[in-house]
């Protein structure tokens, strides 16, 4: 091979020149002359910012360019946001996007980018007010996107998570539902997330539905799955307890092997308020989980007790006690068993358990306390007394034990002993009122009313409490025959008494024939305290009963001045006017009020009204009053009824109703056997030639021979009647009988003379 020593050329000059010319041409063509013109006017710092990266350069070029498509703007904005340049993205959209020309897809993209930018701005902000503003912007944007369709799985997941993060829990649930319906791979998880967000918004009913759907897409053959607990919890919170109960019933039919699952359902049963079901599951665990058997039995006992199933509760605790080897735990279980027997109202069983414990621990005051309470519930006073004295022997100044001894003795009606113990309490706590109150009550029960009154007086003096004043007054009322009278009189000088207490003092003095003192008490009481209508009425009526009519009238006037005129006041004044012989005043008052008095007047007032009407010739009104008086409601002594029948008959006669008058005379005689009514009836029937009534009265008289045989007027009427009927022999016989009863009878002599002349 031949080697040349001629040097090689590194550059081909013509080619190099051609390349240089080509590059210059391209530079001329491609150089951004417009941009160069723009850059001539820009700040140096800004220029450095614009050319710090190709993306920023592209952003500034697009920002200063015209006629750029919405599609390019959205693409660049998304890119800027993805690179963390959310401010540039927001500015580009704000300045360049033409919202009116966006199609449906572009609008959706635009809204999603805006949302992302708001979220980035929120996380970047450190100003509290600005963060609140941006948070509201994010929430508003999420609400605006709510009804968008054709969202990708990733977008839906992002929207759901953002809605949850920013407190729009129902909206988050809505997005998770859409995601579950669209992305079936993780459907259960999406429904579960929807349920969690419903829980956050406290829409537990919807949460339960979501968790139910989540469970449905796991394994329908297994009753318990990873979402069951959330579903049942939501059901409980939404108060859909019937569904919980149905699930528990089904769950019991196919219990899983997992002890954890059974414990979970037991806890759900507790939340739902089904303690008996919880007890069932814990008892099941106790039989199938030997490692924690004692714990399960204790839980089963507790919830059985809550369900008031005390028999099972006791059985479970007895089983738990058999299992444990710890003395402390045995002690604790026995304590619980005692409590269950107490709740079950089986104090005899509780006592049988606790007494051996006390024998082994006689200085355990807490145990003694419990045993005494159980003994009292069992009404075993002997045991309670014995145990409480044991307690007092160790703690003689125990207020609780002393009070308990008081109650034991009081329950056994050993009031003297009870008072001795309460006195010990008083000595230990001299400034407390409660022991003295109990002492006062015991003194009352013992029948020592004077001591009780004195105690209540002392208590009220130091407490000045209305409650104690009321008790003092009631005790004094009950002891009014003792020192209660003086106490009530003393209180009355300073305080207003209850009405009944004032009555009691007044009437007690009256009954004891101390009328002056009674009057003085009541008048003084009424003058020193606020006037009382009922007490004034009592005083007015008492004056009337004492025939001190002027004072009674004065008191009724005072009542009217203070409280106004009523039917009661006017009726009583009317009665007093009559009794004071001021009949004209009584008449005027009656004229004014007679209509309103009709139903209000009592028997005495009605009889005065009848007399007033008779006196001033208001015969019809008088007749109606006497008819009311004669009925059974106003039934009075015989003399008054005879008078009333007589007045009724006479008024009927005056009103031109002789038949009614005759009927009244007849009825009056039948009801009263009054000879006066019979004679007047015979006279009226004779005068009116009423043979029917004359014979009727004669027939009635024959049934009362003893009444009429000595009545000269009766035989005189019979003689005149026989003479009129030309039965002269009968008439002569009757006239002679009249003369035998009344020898100087002019009518009989004239009758005999007339018959003999005939």
Image (spheres, rainbow, N blue to C red):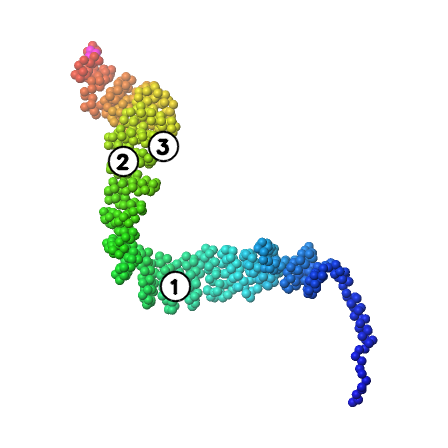
**How far apart are the alpha carbons under marks 2 and 1?**
70 Å
* Magenta region, residue range: 749-753
> Of label 2 and label 1, which has the lower sequence position?
1
Query: Is the residue under label 1 in contact with that under label 3 (CB below 8 Å)?
Result: no
Tell me, for residue 486, which label it has, or none.
2
Q: Is residue 384 visible?
A: no
Disc 1 crowd, CA 10 A, few/some/many (<14, 14-19, 20+): many
- In this view, the residue in front, 586 or 639, is 586
Query: Where in the figure is residue 689, as x and y percent of width and height?
Result: 28, 17
Which residue is drawn at the image coordinates 35% and 57% (left, top)?
308
Tell me, for residue 282, which label it has, or none.
1
Query: Where in the figure is residue 144, as x and y percent of width and height?
Result: 61, 55
Which residue is drawn at the image coordinates 46% and 60% (left, top)?
232
- In this view, the residue in front, 637 or 382, is 382
Locate residue 98 relative to residue 593 in the image: left or right: right
Which residue is drawn at the image coordinates 30% and 31% (left, top)?
522
Q: Is residue 222 visible?
A: yes
**Residue placed under numbered mark 3 in the picture:** 530
- Prevalent SS, magenta region: helix
> Of label 3 and label 2, which has the lower sequence position?
2
């Amino acid at each position: 091979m031949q080697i040349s020593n001629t040097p090689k050329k590194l550059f081909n000059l013509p080619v190099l020149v051609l390349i240089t010319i080509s590059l210059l041409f391209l530079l001329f063509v491609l150089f951004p002359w417009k941009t160069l013109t723009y850059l001539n006017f820009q700040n140096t710092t800004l220029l450095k910012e614009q050319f710090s990266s190709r993306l920023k350069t592209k952003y500034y070029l697009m920002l200063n360019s015209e006629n750029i498509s919405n599609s390019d703007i959205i693409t660049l904005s998304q890119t800027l946001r993805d690179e963390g340049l959310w401010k540039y993205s927001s500015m580009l959209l704000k300045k360049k996007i033409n919202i009116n020309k966006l199609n449906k897809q572009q609008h959706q993209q635009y809204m999603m980018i805006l949302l992302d930018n708001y979220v980035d701005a929120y996380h970047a902000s450190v100003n509290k007010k600005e963060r609140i503003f941006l948070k509201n912007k994010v929430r508003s944007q999420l609400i605006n996107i709510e009804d968008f369709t054709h969202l990708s799985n990733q977008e839906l997941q992002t929207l759901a998570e953002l809605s949850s993060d920013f407190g729009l829990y129902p909206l988050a649930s809505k997005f998770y539902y859409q995601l579950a319906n669209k992305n079936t791979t993780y459907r259960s998880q999406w429904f579960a997330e929807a349920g969690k967000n419903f829980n956050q918004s406290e829409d537990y009913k919807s949460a339960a539905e979501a968790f139910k759907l989540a469970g449905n897409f796991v394994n329908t053959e297994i009753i318990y799955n990873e979402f069951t607990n959330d579903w049942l919890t939501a059901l409980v919170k939404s108060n859909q307890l019937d569904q919980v109960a149905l699930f528990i019933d089904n769950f019991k039919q196919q219990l899983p092997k997992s002890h954890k699952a059974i414990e979970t359902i037991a806890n759900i049963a507790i939340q739902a308020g089904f303690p008996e079901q919880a007890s069932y599951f814990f008892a099941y665990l106790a039989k199938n989980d030997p490692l924690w058997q004692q714990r399960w039995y204790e839980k089963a006992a507790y919830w059985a007790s809550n369900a008031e199933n005390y028999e099972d509760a006791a059985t479970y605790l007895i089983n738990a006690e058999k299992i444990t080897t710890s003395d402390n735990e045995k002690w604790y279980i026995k304590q619980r068993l005692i409590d269950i027997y107490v709740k079950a109202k089986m104090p005899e069983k509780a006592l049988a358990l606790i007494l051996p414990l006390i024998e082994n621990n006689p200085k355990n005051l807490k145990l003694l306390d419990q045993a005494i309470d159980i003994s009292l519930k069992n009404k075993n006073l002997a045991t309670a007394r014995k145990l409480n004295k044991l307690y007092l022997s160790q703690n003689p100044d125990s207020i609780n034990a002393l009070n308990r001894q008081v109650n034991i003795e009081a329950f056994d009606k050993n009031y003297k002993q009870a008072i001795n113990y309460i006195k010990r309490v008083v000595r230990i706590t001299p400034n407390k009122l409660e022991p003295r109150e109990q002492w006062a009550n015991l003194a009352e029960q013992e029948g020592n009313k004077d001591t009780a009154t004195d105690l209540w007086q002392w208590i009220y003096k130091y407490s000045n409490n209305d409650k104690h004043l009321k008790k003092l007054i009631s005790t004094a009322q009950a002891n009014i025959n003792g020192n209660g009278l003086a106490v009530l009189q003393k209180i009355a000088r300073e305080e207003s008494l209850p009405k009944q207490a004032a009555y009691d003092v007044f009437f007690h003095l009256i009954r004891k024939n101390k009328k002056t003192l009674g009057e003085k008490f009541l008048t003084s009481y009424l003058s020193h305290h606020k006037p009382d209508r009922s007490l004034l009425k009592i005083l007015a009526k008492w004056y009337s009963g004492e025939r001190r009519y002027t004072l009674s009238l004065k008191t009724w006037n005072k009542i009217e001045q203070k409280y106004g005129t009523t039917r009661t006041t006017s009726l009583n004044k009317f009665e007093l006017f009559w009794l004071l012989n001021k009949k004209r005043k009584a008449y005027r008052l009656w004229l004014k009020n007679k209509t309103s008095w009709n139903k209000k007047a009592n028997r005495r007032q009605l009889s005065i009204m009848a007399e007033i009407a008779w006196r001033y010739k208001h015969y019809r009104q008088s007749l109606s009053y006497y008819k009311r008086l004669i009925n059974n409601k106003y039934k009075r002594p015989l003399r008054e009824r005879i008078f009333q029948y007589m007045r009724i008959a006479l008024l009927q006669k005056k009103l031109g109703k002789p038949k009614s008058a005759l009927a009244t005379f007849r009825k009056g005689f039948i009801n009263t056997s009054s000879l006066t009514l019979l004679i007047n009836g015979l006279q009226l029937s004779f005068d009116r030639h009423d043979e029917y009534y004359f014979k009727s009265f004669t027939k009635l008289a024959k049934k009362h021979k003893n009444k009429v045989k000595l009545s000269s007027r009766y035989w005189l009427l019979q003689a005149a009647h026989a003479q009129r009927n030309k039965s002269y022999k009968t008439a002569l016989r009757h006239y002679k009988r009249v003369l035998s009863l009344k020898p100087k009878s002019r009518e009989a002599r004239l009758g005999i003379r007339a018959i003999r002349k005939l």
